[in-house]
Amino acid sequence: MFDTISGRLGEVFARLRSKGSLNEADVDSSLSEAKLVLLEADVNLAVVKSLLARVRHRAVGTEVSSSLTPGQQVIKIIHEELITTLGRQAAPLARGSKSPDVILISGLQGSGKTTSAAKIAAHLSSRGRHPMLVAADLQRPAAVDQLQQLGDRIGVPVYSDKKHGPERLARMSVKEARRSGRDVVVNLPCAGRSSAWRAV
């Protein structure tokens, strides 16, 4: 998802970078396009409005008009405000009171849940944790196989059972994680619509 947003925002703001001077209309046009990109990526509306208001405030002020390269200055402002929005300091994942910790990946079909789950599992492994991926997206063809391939590539086991529905699979995966000494369960439900993990 971040790769998609980054690519599309890059296209939107590349036009600003090449301009020798900017006016409010240039900034507003680019920010309108950026708003659409972020909303299509399911970024919260309040977050989008706050981010773009801060960018606009800085971009139409003296910070840009006094710059020798206004387009590049706007790109710098956007970069700084994105960092502020996402958080300047890395924060570790909070640990639960009982093991295993359960991480639920939810989102629209095609939003990158499977890849994100594998990246989270790989990150946790590199930090000494023992994750297990759970392929509970039983609606999408080849979803289980895709996650299995990613799990094999990063050396993280994948748990799935196509004979059971997502709710039973959720309970079984937590029991399997305890049995096999896995301290984190990273789950992929059915395109963000499964309520299975409320039962865990």
Image: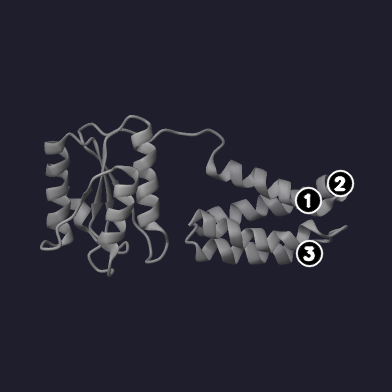
Mark 3 or 1, closer to the camera: 1
Badge number at residue 26 = 3
Q: Position of residue 9 (x, y in %)?
A: 63, 59
Between residues 188 and 41, which one lies in front from this camera angle?
Answer: 188
Give the class, few, some or many, for how many residues have Cα within 10 Å of label 3's Cα (few <14, many ≥20).
some
Q: Please tell me whether mark 1 sits on a helix, a strand or a loop.
A: helix
Amino acid tagged 1 = Gln
- The residue pinned by badge 2 equals 67
In 3D space, how far apart are the residues under numbered discs 3 and 1 (Cα atoms)?
A: 13 Å
Q: Which residue appears at 27% of the width and 58% of the height?
A: 189
Q: Position of residue 27 (x, y in %)?
A: 75, 60
In 3D space, how far apart are the residues under numbered discs 1 and 2 (Cα atoms)?
A: 9 Å
Amino acid tagged 3 = Asp
Left or right of 22? Residue 31 is left
Cβ atoms at labels 1 and 2 below 8 Å apart? yes
Does 96 appear above or below 66? above
